[in-house]
Structure formats: structure tokens, C-alpha cells
Amino acid sequence: MNEHVKTITPETTDLSRRSFLVGTAATGLVLGYAGVPGIGEALAAAPANFEPSVWYAISPDGLVTVTCGKADMGQHIASTMAQIVCEELGAKWSDMRVNLASNDPKFNDPVLGAQITGGSWSTMMNFDAMSRAGAAGRMALTEAAAASMGVPAGELAVRDSMVVHAKSKKQMSFADIVKSGKATKTFTPDELKAIKLKTPDQYTMIGVSVPQIDIPSKTNGTAKYGIDVMLPGMVYGAVVTPPVRYGATVKSVDDSDAKKVPGFIKAVTLDDKTQTTTGWVVAVANTYANAKKAAAALKVSYDGGPNAKLSSQSLLDEAKRLQGLDDSGQFFVKDGDVAAALGSAAKVLEAEYTTSINIHAPMEPMNATAEFKGDILHIYSGNQFATRSGAIAAGAAGIDPKFVVMHQMWLGGGFGRRLDADMMVPAVQAAKAVGKPVKVIYTRENDMTMDFSRPLTYQKVKAGVDGDGKLVALSHDVVSAWPTQRWGIPDFLSPSVDKKGPLDAFTVNGSDFFYTVPNHNVRAIKNEMAHNATPSGQLRSVAPGWTFWAVESMIDEIAAATGKDPAQFRISLLDGAGKNNGGAQRLRNTLLAAMGLAGYGTKKLPKGEGMGVACVSSQERATASWTACVAHVAVAPSGEVTVKKLTVATDVGTQVHPDNIRAQVEGAALWGLSLAMYEKATLKDGGIEQTNFDSYTPLRMSQVPEVAVAVIANGENATGVGEPAVTVVAPAIGNAIFNASGARVRALPITAEAVKGAMKA
């Protein structure tokens, strides 16, 4: 590890208002946003930096600090952004530093218009912009060096933070150029777009597994996570949550016993106008230990509300009822005449697929620290959606969002959990109530029972084949809560093809696959009961985690019913016809790569063992990463399943950091295995029953199989790798179980009881 590569901690985040222009030489830092008076008056003047873009600055000592507008939760996206800039800038890697962006509007994503980290979008949607920012900086530095050296800029080369003139052997370091003050070239947006970037054969940094910039600080303890925040005069809050996940109200609070706890300050009943929480109380004390003791001592009386009697079975029953209605939901895909094609099909197959409630449970507990400084609210927390989180914090405080300054911290895991900002609500309202900075930390029980979980889903699929076994029609109904609609952001919803209004495409993405099927319907149906009782969020993989479970299982069922090899059947469907041109070929290549690496079809397996395949275009059709999996399993007569090996192939286009890509794919595959075989949360009497890792049981180290990864890097645009492999594993395992035992399973997680029952059937 290069000990000279360091991070800038989030506590020193630069919030100055810089435009996306090259050549602004800052003489000081101004902390604050337009219209917010008096923030940052105490900041001392800083040495002049050269700031080629809003995304990075070069200091007079030649260090390059890249500001990452994405949440870094262990996926090293900050280091990836620095690596992309470094490639075009021509800097030396040991000169690179990283910083985490605030919620200043200037950091809003130019594509999405919001600061959000999810969907495996970060690299694919920022590669071009960060490359152009780096190239613009290089051009400005070159022009400044040419003026200083008295040579033509076209004769200069940039490498390792030096601008060199080979003929005269003159050279200037980035530090020298910045100190000269001659780097003044500016670029308009059109000029930035016109910059000719390097071609893949010219890369010297992209495609290299350089040391991750954030690793040293995370291993020596200097990196600051939300839970590490310490402020003068800070006190602590511990939350008391109701037995019902959502909809409860507090009737009364008896704090007489809490007052006996040393350091107890106050019990604050939340009045959450954002409706992020209901029925919460926060106990405030001088230490976290005392806050927890005080919270345990509070006697809170609740009205359970409208969801107090609901269960997982209630939600499933309602989903089935809704699916049975002809007029429910909206169409996401409506190609051809599915009813007519099914009516004339030689064979029709029908199946139901379900997934359970799943919990994020990142290792760093949910936390937030809130402090009011005059009219300004400061929030310290790690979050994946600064735009929305700032608005929720403002709503909890009853102030305008422009008066909220969010200090982004490193995240000890996110996986979609920190797209939500519930932890900010008790911190904000407690800080307002006691007049001190308040840090709120959830217990594991708080987080598990109040998680914005992956929703319970029910899917019904009908497929029709002709006399030759060709798939001619597919009808797919998807019933679930609608997590994205809950956010209340219209731009995140999609128009339905039947013009019935917007739908939450993040509940059906993946169902619009790249197989050629002439008659294809997908209906998105909102389960209002589940939506209200278990307000859901986005868990790593989002909709493709359940839609591909249904699609890839049904494709295997069709292959088995028509006597075809399931892999070859997929290849025949991936012909690239019509709208599937391009994407189908890339997906087929990943399937062939996974099959070859796994030895699919070439090995004679022992009795009770089998291989299964699946291939997916996650996250979304427009931003797909092409991924395939071959799962090798052994099935005992008892129904117990042992996953022996997962072989995953993925097409990433351009790979920035090979080691990191492999780590992401391996981690995603294991998360997919965990969801497929081990993880399940249940609702009873309106509350989540599982409260810790004794009852909610993710994959353990002893259960990890061999994982083989093939990465296809073909020079196409960079794709995302954080989530796609999550979605492909469950159907591959289910299909392998069928090939090993003849048992067809259609519910996640897969249990020995379900496998044994299917074997008997």
C-alpha cells in the first residue's frame, strides 16, 4: 500500500461555490449556499488553489483533491472517481486525494439532477464527465506551462504530475504551474464536450489496480464515519420504536424511571411532518450508554394504528387478490397480443413466484448528528441521497432546505439503506428540543424492525409455446409495495404504456428483458397494504432481484417442458432481433463465458448434483450490465442444498480498477446467495419479528462456496458492477436444484422443506 496516498476526511469538506469551468484560482474558501448568510465567516483564507472543475482542485504543493459526489460505502467509488480524473489529467497517483461532497446544489449530478448513489450508476454515469474534467485541467496546465517556458503547447507532454518539453528538456511540475498563477484557461460546456478523450489503447491508469486511496485512513482509524462524529457540547439520543412498523401513534410517555438514570435530559416524542417515522420517542442523555438506559426505562403507550393486525400472509393474500383483478395495475411492457397468442399456443405454462421481506442490516448502525448554529442546521451522517435527505432533515426541523448543510461521512455499509434519512429525524428534533448537538445511534434492533426493507413480492407468469417449442407469448404480473413512489419525487416514476398514469419502474425493471418474445406483457401492480404496513426501500439489486427470479426460473421451466437444454434455449432467444439488437449479443457472450469457465455441459456430475444457468441485464435495460451465472449445487434426500460453486461472468465495458470489479462481483454474488438461501423477515401483528442476527440469518463464512469470476472488458462504455451479480444467483441456484433433484422451487429463500416437498411432488 502506498503510504503517501491519503484521504481528506469528510470533516474538511470544501463547500465553496465553484462552477464547472476551468481556470478559477481560489484565494479562499467560502462555506455556504446562495441565500444563506453567515456560514463560514470564521474560515481562514486558504492558499491559492487551481480549481479546474467543481470536482477537483490542485493545491500549490501539487496535490490533487478530487471531490466525490457519490456516497462511498466500501465500494471505493471515491477512489474510482479520482482514478478517472487522474487518467486524463496526467497526475501521479501518489499525488491524488479524495474528499466527499456536501449537499451544495453545485454537486447535483448532471445526468440525474440529484445527488444519489444507487442503481450501479456511479461509474457509468460519471466516467465521461470526470474524464473531461481531467482532460480540461491537463489542457489548462499545458497552456500555462507553455507560456512560462516560451514553447508551443503542442510540443509538451504531461505525465506523473509533470509537464515536459522533450526538445529543450524544460519541465514544470503541477505545483510550479499552480504557484505561477498562469493556469487561467476556461472551458464552456460545449468546449468540454468537444474535447477528444483518450482511446482505451492510450490508457495508463484506467484498467490498473492501483492502491485504493481510502484504505490507509480506514485501516489506521483516521477516516471519519457518521458514528465517529464528535462536537463540542454534544449529547446523545436513543430511540424507542413502537411494536408496529408503521402507523402507530404515541398516546403517553411516562419518564419517571428515566429521570432516575444519571445524565438523563429529556424524552422527545417525534412530531414528524415528513411522515418518515410514526410513533417514535427519543431519550436524550449525556452519554449513549445513559441514553440507552433511559430509553429502556421509558414507559410508552401506543395506539397501534391501522396496520397493527397485519402479517406477511396478509400482504401475500392481498397481492394475490390484486393480481386476480383484470383492471389493477399499469402496463410496463405491452408488445403484441398476448391473450391471442396464449389462446392459440400448443402449450401454456403458468407459475407463481414469491420473495420475502429482506433487511439491509449494514454493519455501521444508522446514525446522525444534528446541530443548530443560529438559523443553520448542520447534519453529519453518511447518506446515499443527499438531495432528498436534506429535504427530510429540513422538514423535520420545520425550516427551508436551503438552511441545511449536510456533512457527508464515510458509510459503514449502505446497500440502499442510507437512501433513506429516518435517522436524521430524531437527531434533528432532539437537538431542537434540548438546544444542544445530538447524536442518535440506532441499536441493531431499531434498525432491523424499522428498516425500509426490500418488499415482499408476488409474481404470476404465463408462457405459451408453439408446436416447435418456440416461446411465443409471456404474461408477467408483478405485485409489490412501490418504494420509489414513497419518495414523492415524480421524476423517478415512469409513464405506463397503457396511459393509466405513472408507475414505479424500480419494481419491474428486468422484466423487460433482451429475449425475443413477440407477444409480451408486464403489469406493475401496487400492493397498497404492503406499501403502508412495510414502507419499503431499495435493497442492493432493486427490482431485478425479484423480477429475474421469476423470468429466469420460467425460462428454465419452458426449456424443461419442451425438452431443450436451458442454456441453448436462452441462446436461441438472444438473437438480437429488433429492439434487442446489441444488448442480446453482449448478454449471450456472458452466458457463453460463464458456461465455458464452469465447464457446463462437459462434466459428468455425481447423482444429486446439478448445474443451473441464468443471465440478466441488470440494473435497468437502459443502463444494463450483462451478467450470467452457472451455479453448481448438491441436493441431499432431505432437501438440504449445498451450493458448491458459483461461476459469474460480467461484461463491464471499460474496467477502471480490475481488482475492485472482481471484489464487487464476488460480494454481489454472495449477497445473491444469501438472499436466495438464508435471509427472510416476517411481519406479525404489524411488526417485523426478526430483531438481530440470531433470527435474521444472512450467509455465514462457513457457507461460502467457491466463486469464480470472468470479467469481459471490451472497451465499450463503463457499466456498473455493484448489483447485477446479486440478481443472477438465485435463479441459477433454483435451476441447478431442478437439474440435481427434479425439484422446482418458486419461493425465496429456498428451504430444505420446500425442496423436499417439490421432490415428492
Image: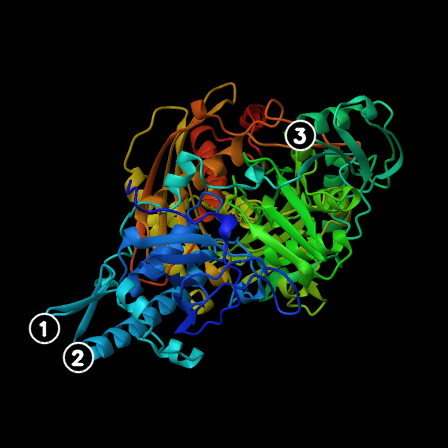
**Which amino acid, mark 3?**
Tyr
Whole-Å distance between the Cαs marked 2 and 3?
Answer: 64 Å
Amino acid type shown at disc 2: Val
| The C terminus - image quarter | top right
Residue at 55%, 34% in the rendered image: 745
The foreground one among 268 and 645 is 268
Report if the CB atoms under discs 1 and 2 are less than 8 Å apart. Answer: yes
Q: Amino acid at mark 1?
A: Ser
Q: Earlier in the sequence, mark 1 or mark 2?
A: 2
Which circle's residue, 2 or 3, is located before the other in the chain? 2
Colour setting = rainbow
Query: As displayed, is residue 720 above or below residue 708?
Result: below
State the CA–CA distance, disc 3 to disc 1.
65 Å
> Which mark, by number, is residue 168?
1
Residue where numbered disc 2 is placed: 151
- Helix, strand or loop at mark 1: loop
Residue in front for this viewpoint, 354 or 309: 309
